[in-house]
Image (tube, grey):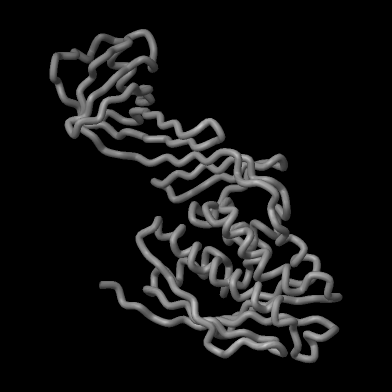
Amino acid sequence: MEEIVKTEFKISYDDTGELNKHQINAKDLGTAIIGMYDLITKAAEIVSNGSSKADLKVVAPAKEGSLEVIFAIVADPLTTTTVLKSIGIGVATAAAGIGTALGIMDRIRDTKIDRVIVNQRTQKATLETKDGPIETDSKVALLVSSKEIRQALHKVIQAPVQGRPEAKVSFIIDDKRLTLEEDRIKSFTQIRSDVTERETSRTLQKTVQFTKLNFKSKRGWNIQTTDGMEMSVVIQDPLFLEKIAANEEAFKKEKLYAVELEETTTINASGTKTKYAIVRVIN
C-alpha cells in the first residue's frame, strides 16, 4: 500500500484595507476553504484517473480575522506532488507559463474552451479556443477543462477578495511563494458553460483478424480481436497499405495480425462516439 503523507501549504490574502489588518469576513474565508477542498480532492481524482484520492485538512483553526490559512494535503506522495505541480502551487513560473492550471487560466481568462484533445500515449493535450490552440500536459488540460476545478479556483482566488483594492493572493509552500495580484486575480472568473467537446485517444496492442477488406481505400475495413472485440477500422499504416497495393499481402481465413490500435473517444452534446484506427501492423 502506498505511503500516506501530510504536506502543508499556505494561502495568504492581502490588500490595503481590512486584510492588511489581518481581518477577513468569515463567509468569504469559508467559501475559500470549501473551494480549496473541492480543488484538491477533485484534482487528485483527475490527475490519477480515479486511482488515488487526497484529503484536505485545515491545520490552523480558521476564524474571522485570519489572513493566512494553513492547509495539509493527506495523500500518497506521488498524488500530492502531481496535484500541486499541475495546479501550479509551488511552481515559481505558474502564473506566466502554460505548464500549470493557474498559468493557463491566467492566459485564457474567461475564454471558452471549445475542445480538449488528449493523447494518453504521449501525455500531451491540446486546448482549442477561439484565440487558437494551446499545447500543454494532459493532466493540466484535464484540470483546466473541468468546470468543477475552475469553479473551485474562483472560490479560492477571486471570490474572497472581490471588490478589494490592490488585492493579492499568495500560495506558499516551503520557501516558494506564488503571488497573484489584482490584474491576474480577475482571470479566475466563474465560467458560464462547460467544454463543448472532449476527445481522448489511447494506443492498444491487439491480435486481430480481418473480417472485411477494402483494397481500394484505407477505410471500410473490419476486424475482430482475439479478446472478443469487433469494430470497423481505418488503416493508417502506409507500409501495410503499400503491400496491399502491390499484392504482396495474402489474406487468409483466420490469419492473425499483431497491430497497434488507436482508440479515440469523443464526448459532446450528441453523446459518446468511439472510433478505431490501425496505426501499425507489427507482424
Q: Position of residue 59 (x, y in %)?
A: 52, 87
Above or below residue 32? Residue 199 is above
Look at the image and tell me in which quarter the N terminus lies: bottom left
- Total residue callouts: 0
Above or below residue 107? Residue 279 is above
Q: Is residue 88 left or right of residue 155?
A: left
Q: Is residue 2 left or right of residue 9?
A: left
Quarter assignment of residue 20: bottom right
Quarter assignment of residue 185: bottom right
| Residue found at x 49% / y 62% | 42
Look at the image and tell me in which quarter the C terminus lies: top left
Q: Position of residue 247 (x, y in %)?
A: 25, 9
| Residue found at x 53% / y 30% | 270
Towards the viewer: 101 or 247: 101
> Is residue 200 among the parts visible in the rendering?
yes
Q: Is residue 241 left or right of residue 166?
A: left
> Is residue 238 among the parts visible in the rendering?
no
Q: Is residue 238 left or right of residue 157?
A: left
| Residue found at x 67% / y 82% | 12
Q: Position of residue 144 (x, y in %)?
A: 59, 55
Q: Position of residue 164 (x, y in %)?
A: 83, 75
